[in-house]
């Protein structure tokens, strides 16, 4: 069933869009990511213009994240104080990102920029997560039955001023690292159309030192507000939010998020991290190949005189 998208100005398969929303919703529930790093490239692949894909995918991110968050609230695995700190930084970063996106759109460079951002950040984050996950699995096997010693890798986080106690996470650290992490995620959310989960989840684990059991729910909490704000700013500033596309993605995403939350409970923390890393690297590879390989259809512009 073909549907015409008025803002994107293309016709797409309706069931295919529902399926994309469903799959991304499942991943959102499993990993605690908004799914934007996956849904936006998938929209590129089926012919949605990048500017519309970036702005509209944030709608689905909000819906699927909210659906998954409800399940985590019931299990009390959400650190609301940490989420508020991340959200404050995220809103500021998103505002800056919107203006950067609008400036590049007016210059006609936004499509290339979005693709390059995806390849760079997905490749960097995915590689770091994959290496760290493999090391964590090896250490867990080597240290089975022996007590774990606390490392000093996050001493700089503890040394910063304005320390705050985040009771649910069991942390007493400066408020600045969460604000900085949130700010970076906000910029990426506006430019790439992502909730930023693929960045904030590793940052919460490896930089802030949060326990994995509260990372997923807390990540979803901040994603909801930052993504919702991004949608409103894109709609007001760039007019690139396609309502028909958004509704189809939301319906699939809400259903998939509930399924994904149940699947996530069956996996160990190390397994979750390495699976997310592999998923991120797969999307990065596909986008990188699309940029590097010669397109199947070549177009040339000729100047006609007279």
Image: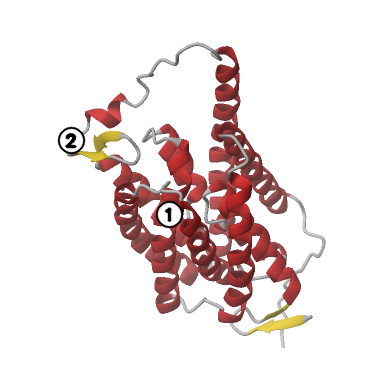
Q: How many marks?
A: 2
- Which residue lies at the image location 62% right of the left edge and 41% below the top edge? 266
For mark 2, give the secondary structure.
loop
- Which residue lies at the image location 68% right of the left edge and 52% below the top edge? 291
- The answer to which of 305 and 19 lies nearer the viewer is 19
Residue 109 visible in the current orientation: no
Q: Which mark is residue 73?
A: 1
Lateral position of residue 171 relative to residue 76, left or right: left
Q: Is residue 96 above or below residue 158?
A: below
- Which residue lies at the image location 62% right of the left edge and 34% below the top edge? 271
**Going by the picture, which residue comes out furthest to the bottom?**
306
Dividing the image into 4 quarters, which one contains the N terminus? bottom right
- The answer to which of 290 and 305 lies nearer the viewer is 290
Q: Is residue 59 above or below residue 289?
A: below
Lateral position of residue 74 relative to residue 60, left or right: left
Query: For the residue carrying disc 1, how many other residues have a C-alpha within 10 Å: few (<14), some (14-19), or many (20+)?
Result: some
- The answer to which of 181 and 288 lies nearer the viewer is 181
Q: Is residue 41 above or below residue 249?
A: above
Say whether marks 2 and 1 touch (CB < 8 Å): no
Query: For the residue carrying disc 2, how many other residues have a C-alpha within 10 Å: few (<14), some (14-19), or many (20+)?
Result: few
Q: Report which quarter residue 303 is drawn in.
A: bottom right
Give how far across and how far down residue 280 sits, in percent.
Answer: 62, 45
Give how far across and how far down residue 76 sits, in percent.
Answer: 41, 48
Lateral position of residue 13 relative to residue 50, left or right: right
Residue highlighted by disc 2: 161
* Foreground: disc 2 or disc 1: 1
Give how far across and how far down residue 3 sits, in percent.
Answer: 72, 82
């Amino acid at each position: 069933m073909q549907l015409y998208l008025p803002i994107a100005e293309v016709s797409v398969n309706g069931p295919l869009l529902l399926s994309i929303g469903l799959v991304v919703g499942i991943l959102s529930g499993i990993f605690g990511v908004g799914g934007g790093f996956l849904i936006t490239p998938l929209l590129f692949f089926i012919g949605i213009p990048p500017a519309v894909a970036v702005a509209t995918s944030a709608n689905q991110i909000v819906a699927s994240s909210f659906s998954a968050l409800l399940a985590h609230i019931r299990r009390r695995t959400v650190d609301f104080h940490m989420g508020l700190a991340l959200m404050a930084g995220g809103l500021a970063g998103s505002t800056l990102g919107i203006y950067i996106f609008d400036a590049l759109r007016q210059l006609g460079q936004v499509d290339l920029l979005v693709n390059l951002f995806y390849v760079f950040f997905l490749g960097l984050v995915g590689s770091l997560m994959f290496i760290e996950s493999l090391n964590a699995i090896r250490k867990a096997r080597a240290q089975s039955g022996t007590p774990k010693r606390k490392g000093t890798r996050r001493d700089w986080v503890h040394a910063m001023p304005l320390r705050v106690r985040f009771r649910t996470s069991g942390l007493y650290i400066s408020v600045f690292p969460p604000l900085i992490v949130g700010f970076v995620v906000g910029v990426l959310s506006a430019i790439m159309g992502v909730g930023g989960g693929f960045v904030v989840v590793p940052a919460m684990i490896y930089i802030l030192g949060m326990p994995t059991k509260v990372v997923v729910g807390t990540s979803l909490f901040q994603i909801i507000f930052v993504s919702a704000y991004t949608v409103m700013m894109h709609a007001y500033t760039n007019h690139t939010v396609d309502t028909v596309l958004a509704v189809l993605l939301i319906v699939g995403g809400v259903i998939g998020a509930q399924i994904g939350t149940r699947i996530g409970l069956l996996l160990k923390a190390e397994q979750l991290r390495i699976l997310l890393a592999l998923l991120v690297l797969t999307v990065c590879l596909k986008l990188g190949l699309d940029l590097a390989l010669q397109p199947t259809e070549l177009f040339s512009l000729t100047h006609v005189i007279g």
